[in-house]
Image (tube, rainbow, N blue to C red):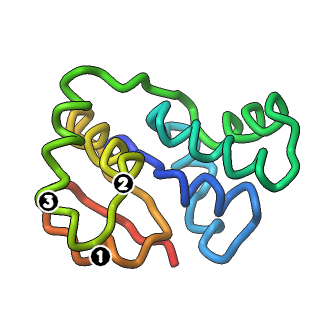
Amino acid sequence: MSRPVFDASAILCILQNERGADKLTEQIRDTAVASAVNMAEVQGKLVLKGSDPEIAWDDALLCVSEVEALTAEQAKLAGSLIQSTALYGLSLGDRSCLALAFTLGGEVYTTDKTWKNLKLGVPIHVIR
């Protein structure tokens, strides 16, 4: 099995027990990784909803086994992906998630339905 890579929406789905969270089983979560960019996005959204920043960060960490720093190679790839993803409105965080999946040979998990239309050569699982 290739490495699961969670985007911010997948992590928020777990934390907020939203529809689709059950698809991200303990087996998947035990090996899941997220970009530090996506973790910052999750923490920020939780803080805006009233969470303490430390608690928000700790909660986000519960959803993945590892947080990966954005490398120069991934940053370059994320920047380059704007050409093929602009039509779908992907953010820098979204593209960072995809770049991480590319470099790890992983597969992405997201709740964003527009990602179904992406044909980038990385497996994408839309969980709801």
Q: Residue at x 23, y 77 (%)?
A: 117
Mark 2 belongs to which amino acid? Val
Secondary structure under badge 2?
Answer: strand
The picture places residue 109, in percent across and down from the top left corner, at: 43, 58
For the residues marked 2 and 1, what is the alpha-carbon distance in whole angstroms? 11 Å
Q: Circles 3 and 1: CB distance less than 8 Å?
A: no
Which numbered disc flags the more N-terminal residue, 2 or 3?
2
Label 2 – label 3 distance at C-alpha: 11 Å
Out of 37 and 108, give the one closest to the viewer: 37
Q: Residues within 10 Å of mark 1 (few under 14, many from 20)?
A: few
Residue 92, horizontal then vertical, whole percent: 36, 47
- Residue toward you, 48 or 26: 48
The residue that label 3 is drawn on is 120
Residue 3 quadrant: top left
Is 108 above or below relative to 86?
A: above
Which residue is under mark 1? 116
Looking at the rendered structure, which numbered label has been put on residue 108? 2
Left or right, residue 44 beside residue 7? right
Task: Measure how far apart labels 3 and 1 are at the Cα level.
Answer: 11 Å
